[in-house]
Amino acid sequence: MRIDLHTHSTASDGTDAPAELVRKAAATGLDVVALTDHDTTRGHAEAIAALPEGLTLVTGAELSCRLDGISMHMLAYLFDSDEPALLAERELVRDDRVPRAQGMIAKLRELGVPVTWEQVARIAGDGSVGRPHVASALVELGVVPTVNDAFTEDWLADGGRAYVEKHETDPFEAIRLIKGAGGVAVFAHPAASKRGRTVPEAAIAEMAVAGLDGIEVDHMDHDADTRARLRGLAKELGLLVTGSSDYHGSRKTCVLGEYTTDPEVYGEITRRAFGAFPVPGAGGV
């Protein structure tokens, strides 16, 4: 089985519509794909309706978190999307995205970049607006060559000249909410140092005690030495090890199925979850 447990659609900051994403996943030869848009489950219904036969969908989300000033992401799998406490927290995070993006635009304009809210809103479309959309606007304007080049101290990285904070969930609270909604919690790309400061391993150990289920080890932002170190940490803490592409369509260079999750780990995730169940494809529409 080929299992990719981290992808994004136009419901957040990907460039493929949910239906297009699942069709591409099947064409790529994946058996299981998780749709984990940022702080939203809005793309799930469309993905399920289009799900090709032979492909299973894991419903999920990637929750925006912050610990001691360090931005981090928590993957939530197979939770009850209507559970009130987690739903309220997702809405709180999403509601802060528009004023945050507008604040970044204001800072960029002060730096002489002629970006506008209309441009960023057009790029975001129906998705939850975020830094990648602002970064794409910088690419359109020729300020930076790629989206990744916008995530530096010169521009949009944490603490950068145009950075603006937003509401982000405490990761321990995120774990509590995910588990309370019947889901499984996995720390996304925990050592992606190119994105900024990373959470110390001691904090990951504390999260494990608090109920964290796993860490995403096999990821494009982790080199071979980092993956080996994280595997050792996961073994020491009794955490599951996942792998995934973090696919965003054309917005990033990663491809579907670039990294995958072991079928035994996937089986354990489905055994632990009780908020929702994987959805087998029925041929799509």
Image: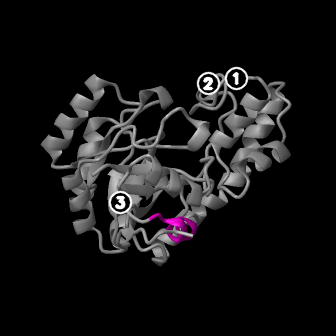
The dominant secondary structure in magenta is: helix
What residue sits 41% from the left and 63% below the top? Answer: 57
Tell us which disc is closer to us: 1 or 3.
Answer: 1
Instruction: Compute the Cα span from label 1 to label 3.
Output: 36 Å
- Residue 48 colored magenta? yes
The percent position of residue 208, horizontal first and vertical second, equals 24, 51
Left or right position of 204 against 103? left
Q: Which residue is mark 2?
A: 149
What residue sits 68% from the left and 35% below the top? Answer: 135
What residue sits 46% from the left and 50% below the top? Answer: 27
Can the viewer see residue 93 in this picture? no
Callout 1 environment at 10 Å: few (<14), some (14 to 19), or many (20+)? some
Which of pointers 3 and 2 lies earlier in the amino acid sequence? Answer: 2
In what element is the residue under mark 3?
Answer: helix
Which of pointers 1 and 3 lies earlier in the amino acid sequence? Answer: 1
Left or right position of 127 against 30? right
In what element is the residue under mark 2?
Answer: helix
The percent position of residue 221, horizontal first and vertical second, equals 41, 31
Where, by quadrant of the figure, is residue 83 drawn? bottom left
Closest to the observer, 202 or 223: 223
Can the viewer see residue 94 in this picture? yes
Q: Which residue is mark 3?
A: 175
Look at the picture and state if 46 lies above or below 102: below
Amino acid at circle 1: Val
In what element is the residue under mark 1?
Answer: loop
Instruction: Compute the Cα span from label 3 to label 2.
Output: 31 Å
Tell us which disc is closer to us: 3 or 2.
Answer: 2
Q: Which residue is mark 1?
A: 144
Amino acid at circle 3: Ile
Q: Are marks 1 and 3 in contact (CB under 8 Å)?
A: no
Q: Are marks 1 and 2 in contact (CB under 8 Å)?
A: yes
Q: Which residues are magenta?
A: 44-52
